[in-house]
Image (cartoon, helix red, strand yellow):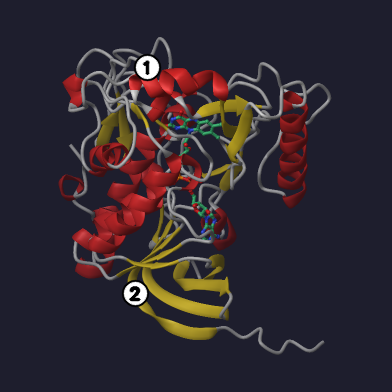
Amino acid sequence: MDMRGMDPVFKGSYDVIVVGGGIAGVAASVSAARAGASVLLLEKQINLGGLATGGLISWYEPLCDGEGKQMIHGIAEELIKLSAKYCFDNLPETWGGRSGNKPNNQRYSTYFSPTVFSAALDGFVIENGVQIRFDSLATYPVMNGNVCEGVIVESVNGREFFAAKVVIDATGDASVMHRAGVPTVVGENFMTYIAHYYDTSMAEELVKNKNTCVFRKWINTGSDMYGNGHPQGMRLLTGVSCEDITDYVIAGKKNLLQKFSQRDKNTFDVMTLPTMPQFRTIRRIVGKTDFRGIDGETFADSIGNCGDFRAGGEGKHYQIPFGSLYNESFPNLLAAGRIISAPQGDGWEVARVIPTCALTGEVAGRAAAQIAVKNQKISEINIEQIRVN
Ligand SMILES: Cc1cc2nc3c(=O)[nH]c(=O)nc-3n(C[C@H](O)[C@H](O)[C@H](O)COP(=O)(O)OP(=O)(O)OC[C@H]3O[C@@H](n4cnc5c(N)ncnc54)[C@H](O)[C@@H]3O)c2cc1C
């Protein structure tokens, strides 16, 4: 077999490589750079924000506990402000928002424009000293035993190798850590296919209120987060097989056209289709410690707090253990975002939303810098230096 062009070209060394430019990867790369590390952020698409932007989520779940107490600070808070900076929001006045925005909202959460927020993320990352590479799919970690020496990247350049002292997996599907040999667990997902559209029915309100927040509408051609409306006869989707992703995308678009087919075609337009599959729980690592989402559970290695975004979750307080971001057998690999060690159920539910992903990303970045720049062992990291209060 002729394998020409298959040998990777060496492209350079970094203290920290972050794979995936979703919310977790953005937070991880910025925090590692702020802590003095040289950082490369690899993103396979051409926009940052991942599910939050390309997946059209556009609702920043709360940073507060629903009873007036702020639970998450740090980059998660910087990012909610950034999400509201250039376009519509409905951040309440009590949490620093502008008055009069609709629809009404009491918690420290907001709607945001996924397109405009995504555009703003580039500057946030670059101004903090991170080097970004778009169109760069990290395919395989290069391992020396359980130590990761860097990653192979495919792009229009061909196949390249980037070396790193620490690699943070912020892929949303733990593909880097999975391929490195870290034990992982695959989730199952109901079909959810959300696109954004506008129609003439909102035009009057848009003009009257001068607020585009009311104009961007969601259409879901799958089911809600509890599976109500999941297409009859359709299997649950994992998101770790190309077949699942292909079936999901084809079904989602077909259902979308069906849903609109009854309408007068001159009264609406679809603004944006999702550019990545909207699977909530794809694959997560099995770490040193599980974050199980138990109200009030405390950890000696707690790296920050969060609340519960779900209805009925008001007043719930969770600590997240640093041990949920790594597996002890892999000394220079860290997980960030919706792939941390959090079993299906309350743990994964709470861990996977935007603010918690930003929190675990920020901590992973700080920890990576401690390992790469200060030569600390993962097990010896001073939690005080990485915790986000
Ligand atoms: C249907 C649905 C509704 C939701 N609703 C809400 C909500 O209302 N509010 C809320 O706060 N959260 C919500 N969430 C959850 C939240 O949006 C996501 O879990 C969160 O944004 C995930 O962030 P992440 O950075 O961990 O991963 P992702 O957003 O998945 O980012 C991963 C990034 O890595 C890139 N990538 C992946 N593999 C590679 C690779 N090998 N090489 C290079 N790049 C790679 C991807 O392109 C992507 O940009 C929802 C999720 C779903 C599915």
In the rendered view, does 295 fall on the left or right side of 228? Answer: left
At 25% from the left and 44% from the top, the residue drawn is 75
Q: Which of 257 and 329 is in front in this view?
A: 257
Q: Which quadrant would the C terminus be assigned to in this image?
A: top left
Q: Which amino acid does label 1 sit on?
A: Pro
The answer to whether residue 334 is seen in the rendering is yes
Q: Which of 97 and 3 is in front in this view?
A: 97
Q: Quadrant of residue 39?
A: bottom left
The spot of residue 174 in percent (x, y) is: 53, 51
Q: Which mark is residue 14?
A: 2
Q: Where is residue 136 in the image (x, y as percent from the top left)?
A: 52, 67
The quarter holding residue 162 reads bottom left
**The residue tagged with tag 1: helix, strand or loop?**
loop
Q: Residue at x 35, y 26 (%)?
A: 211
Q: Nearer the viewer, residue 83 or 88?
A: 88
Mark 2 C-beta to ligand 1 under 8 Å: no
Q: How far apart are marks 1 and 2 (CA)?
A: 45 Å
Would you say 227 lies left or right of 81 here?
A: right
Residue receiving disc 1: 103
Could you tell me which quadrant the N terminus lies in? bottom right
Position in image of residue 183 (x %, y %): 56, 50
Q: Is residue 370 above or below residue 171?
A: below
> Measured along the vertical axis of the image, is residue 373 above or below residue 227?
below
* Disc on res. 318: none
Q: What residue type is labelled 2?
A: Tyr
Which residue is found at the position 29% from the left and 63% from the top?
A: 126
Of the two numbered discs 1 and 2 on the same chain, state the one appearing first in sequence: 2
- SS assignment at label 2: strand
